Amino acid sequence: MSRSFRKMNLVGALGLILLLVGSAIGLFVAPAEKHMGDVMRIIYVHVPSAWVSMLCFAFAFGLAIWSLWSGKAQADARMTGAIETGVVLNGLLLIQGSIWARATWGVWWDWDVRLTTSLVMMLLFAGVLALRAVVDDTHRRATWSAVATIVAFVDVPLVYFCVRWWRSLHQVQSTPDTLDPAMVVPLRINAFAILFVALWLISMRSRIELERRRQEEVEAPERIVFEGSPEHA
C-alpha cells in the first residue's frame, strides 16, 4: 500500500469523523431557527453538499483544461473522479432540497431558477459520464469528455449567482454575519467534512480509472486483426 493511498484513507476517515461531529452539533447543540424551527437543521448537510459539489465541478473544469493541454492520463482520471463525486453530491443536494422545500414551501419541487439550474447542472455532468461510456478509444474519450466538461461548467456559476440575478423563491446565500455563531460552527465543520470525503472519493475513483485505462491499452493490440491473418479471412 503506497504512502499516498494511506494518506487519502486518513483524509476520508477524518472527513467521516468530522461529519459525525458537525451533524451532532447541528442537531443537538445549535439553536433552532426563529421562523423555520428544527426544519432548518437540514442546512448542515444541504449547504455543504452544494458547496462541495460545485467545487468538484470546478476541479473537473481545471482538470479538463489540463487534460487537453497535456494529454496526461492522470488528468483525465482525476477529472472523471471529480465529475462522478460532484454528480453524487449534486443528487444529494436535490434530494435534500426537495425535503426542505416540502416542509417550507409545501411542495417537493418547484421550477424555481436555483432548483432548475441545479438540476441542469447534474444532468450536464451526468451527460459527460454517459459520453465516456459510449466512446471506446481512450484518447478520443479523454478529449471529448474534457471538451464536454468545459461546456457543462458554464452552468456552475449560473447556479451560484442566479438567486442574485433573478427573483427566486430560494433565499440568497447566507453569510456568517446573517447566521447565529452557534450555527456557523457545525456548518463549517460539515463543509470540511464533506470536502475531505469528496477528495477521498476522487482519489479512489482516479485509481480505478487509471487501472481501467492501462488494461484497455494492454488489450488494444490483442484486438487488432492484421490483414491476411486467418481471423481477417
Image: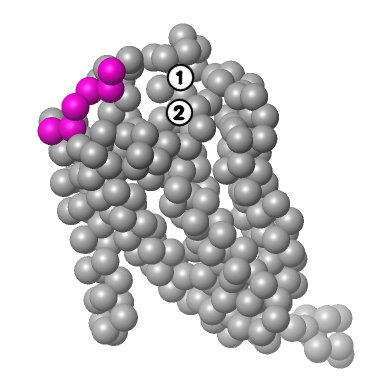
Q: Where residue 12 appears, x then y in whole percent?
A: 27, 62
Which quarter of the picture shows residue 24?
Answer: top left
Q: Nearer the viewer, residue 114 or 149?
A: 114
Front residue of 32/91: it is 32
Q: Residue at x 58, y 80 (%)?
A: 73
Residue 141 visible from this viewpoint: no
Counting from the top left corner in percent of width and height, residue 184 is at 27, 42
Separation of residues labelled 1 and 2 (CA atoms): 6 Å
What amino acid does circle 2 point to?
A: Gly
* Tag 1: amino acid: Ala
Q: Nearer the viewer, residue 62 or 175?
A: 175
User: Measuring 30% from the left and 71% from the top, which residue is drawn there?
Assistant: 8
Question: Residue at label 1?
Answer: 101
The residue where tag 2 is placed is 97
**Vertical placement of residue 26 versus 14, above or below:** above
Indicate which disc residue 116 carries: none
Q: Residue at x 41, y 30 (%)?
A: 96
Rendered location of residue 194, percent (x, y) = 33, 52
SS class, disc 2: helix
Q: Which residues are magenta?
A: 29-34
Q: Are marks 1 and 2 in contact (CB under 8 Å)?
A: yes
Give the farthest residue toward the top: 106
Report whether 37 appears left or right of 119: left
Q: Left or right? Give the position of 123 relative to 210.
A: right
Q: Main secondary structure of the magenta part?
A: loop
Secondary structure at badge 1 equals helix
Q: Quadrant of residue 183?
A: top left
Q: How is the image coloured?
A: one colour
Q: Which quadrant does the C terminus fall into? A: bottom right
Q: Is residue 183 left or right of residue 212?
A: left
Magenta span contains residue 42: no
